[in-house]
Image (tube, rainbow, N blue to C red):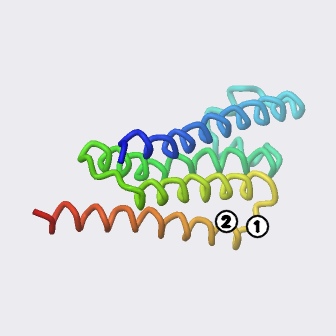
Amino acid sequence: MNNIAIFQPMFVVALLTVVVTLRMYFTRVSAMKKFRIHPQKAQDTTKLKDLLPEEVNRVSNNYNHLFEQPTLFYVVVLSIATLGHVDSVYVICAWAYAIIRIAHSIIQITIDKVIVRFMLFILSWLVLATMIIRESIMLFFTI
């Protein structure tokens, strides 16, 4: 299988991060203007969160989440491709991961139902763990 196929879902997750970054920028700046919050108050984002509406904070929370678990996804995808182990199972897992992360972002940014978000989080971890465990078996037990 072509190694490039696994990069498409990886870049979808990266593009999701770009979209959420832009949304965070526009919602945060707009809210800061509306509530007359001086930009210097954004120096400490923990204090800024107390000054901004919940819907603005949900976007920034999601932005932060996109730099947690997905960073491991990027490393795993790059490793699988570099080692030349890309196959249909990995590509399907990578697409499943990307789709689940998009759903997670949509839920968190809009309705933010924690139980739904948590289920999507666990599901994305199961997909990622499948990729990690499968590649580990290939690395350590295949000659």
Q: Quadrant of the C terminus?
A: bottom left
Which residue is the extreme one toward the left? 143
Using a 10 Å C-alpha cutoff, classify the residue at mark 2 as few (fewer than 14 neighbours), some (14 to 19) or many (20 or more): many
Task: From the viewer's side, name the closer residue of 88 and 131.
Answer: 88
Q: Is residue 43 left or right of residue 125?
A: right
| Element under disc 1 | loop
Q: Position of residue 92 (x, y in %)?
A: 49, 58
Write down the residue under mark 2.
117
Residue 12 in which image quadrant: top right
Q: Position of residue 94 (x, y in %)?
A: 48, 54
Residue at 61% x, 59% y: name it: 100
User: Is the residue marked by circle 1 packed among few (<14), some (14-19), or many (20+) residues within 10 Å?
Assistant: few
* Residue for badge 1: 113
Inter-mark Cα distance, 2 to 1: 6 Å
Amino acid under disc 2: Arg
Classify residue 100 as left or right of residue 141.
right
Looking at the image, which is closer to me, 57 or 83? 83
Look at 67% across and 44% down and name the residue there. 60
Amino acid beneath label 1? Lys
Total numbered labels = 2
Secondary structure under badge 2?
A: helix
Furthest-front residue in this view: 1
Q: Is residue 73 left or right of residue 98?
A: left
Disc assigned to residue 62: none
In the rendered image, residue 82, in percent from the top left (x then y), is placed at 27, 42
Decide: marks 2, 1 in contact (CB < 8 A)? Answer: yes
What residue do we see at 76% from left, 35% from top?
A: 28
Query: Which of 62 and 79 lies nearest the eye of the viewer?
Result: 79
